[in-house]
Amino acid sequence: MTRAALLVLADGRFPAGGHAHSGGAEEAVRAGRITDAAGLEQFCRGRLHTTGLVSAALAAAAALGADPVELDAAADARTPSPALRTAARRLGRQLMRAARATWPSPDLDALARRFPKGAHQPVVLGLTARSAGLGPDDAAYCAAYESVGGPATATVRLLSLDPFDATAVLARLAPELDQVVERAVLAAQRVAHDGVAALPAASAPLLEIGAEAHAAWPVRLFAS
């Protein structure tokens, strides 16, 4: 295993399609829930402990070798919003293209054949980490960081927020990100014995409602 692979996978310039998604930030900005760095921090904290936790656990479980088909079904069950399910599969498809070009593996090929329109992004992320020789904690960190890094970057564009302020928000959330990753990996380790029911199912109803509203906008900057 080389930790340099983690840097490649976590790099915002890795062509996985995340730049086109705001993680719900665009809708939150229009609704007035994010107006400054303080609002961004509150939004990201809520997202980290719900969507971020679930995504990190799914990614860690995939990296540990859990059945990706079962994990994909678990991701579906934990994503009530059709718009968010569609976004997750689009992101999964794009990540799959990048992953197969970067770290080719039979496991990625098999998942791509099983889900030609895309598996859920956290499942693909975990399998990508496994193919790159990374561990479940690495996969969980990537997923958890994506859950807050995407909205922070999007908010810089949406509000012309000072990028230093947005980065400071991410730095302040770092200890909580560590806690979320620890919880996610512990849950993922239980999947081998207890099945996918051991994975967290934290919900963020306002994100789900906002995603449905956002998907209906005729004009928007981000896909989700």
Image (cartoon, rainbow, N blue to C red):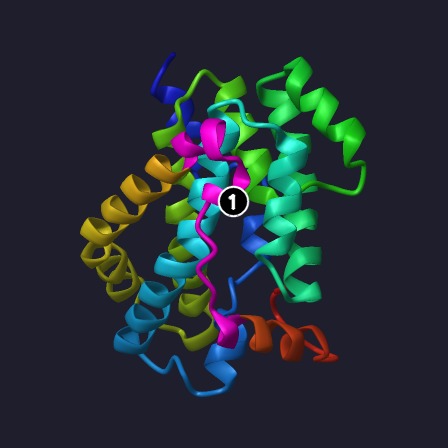
Relative vertical location of residue 101 with respect to residue 182 in this rendering, above or below: above
Residue 65 vs residue 138: left or right?
A: right
Relative vertical location of residue 82 with respect to residue 181 in this rendering, above or below: below
Residue 77 vs residue 8: left or right?
A: right
In the picture of the structure, the residue carrying the numbered disc 1 is 197
Residue 181 vs residue 73: left or right?
A: left
Q: Nearer the viewer, residue 18 or 72?
A: 72
Which segment is the magenta one? 188-207
| Disc 1 residue crowd, few under 14, some 14–19, many 20+, Cα 10 Å | few
Instruction: Report whether residue 114 is seen.
Output: yes
Residue at screen point 68% across, 34% down: 69
Q: Please identify the quarter of the rendering in which residue 122 is found.
A: top right
Q: Position of residue 184 (x, y in %)?
A: 37, 42
Whether 174 is among the magenta residues is: no
Q: Nearer the viewer, residue 63 or 125?
A: 63
Residue at screen point 64% across, 41% down: 72
Residue 16 vs residue 148: left or right?
A: right
Q: Farthest residue in the front direction?
A: 194
Residue at screen point 44% across, 60% down: 202
Q: Amino acid at mark 1?
A: Ala
Q: Position of residue 84 (x, y in %)?
A: 63, 61
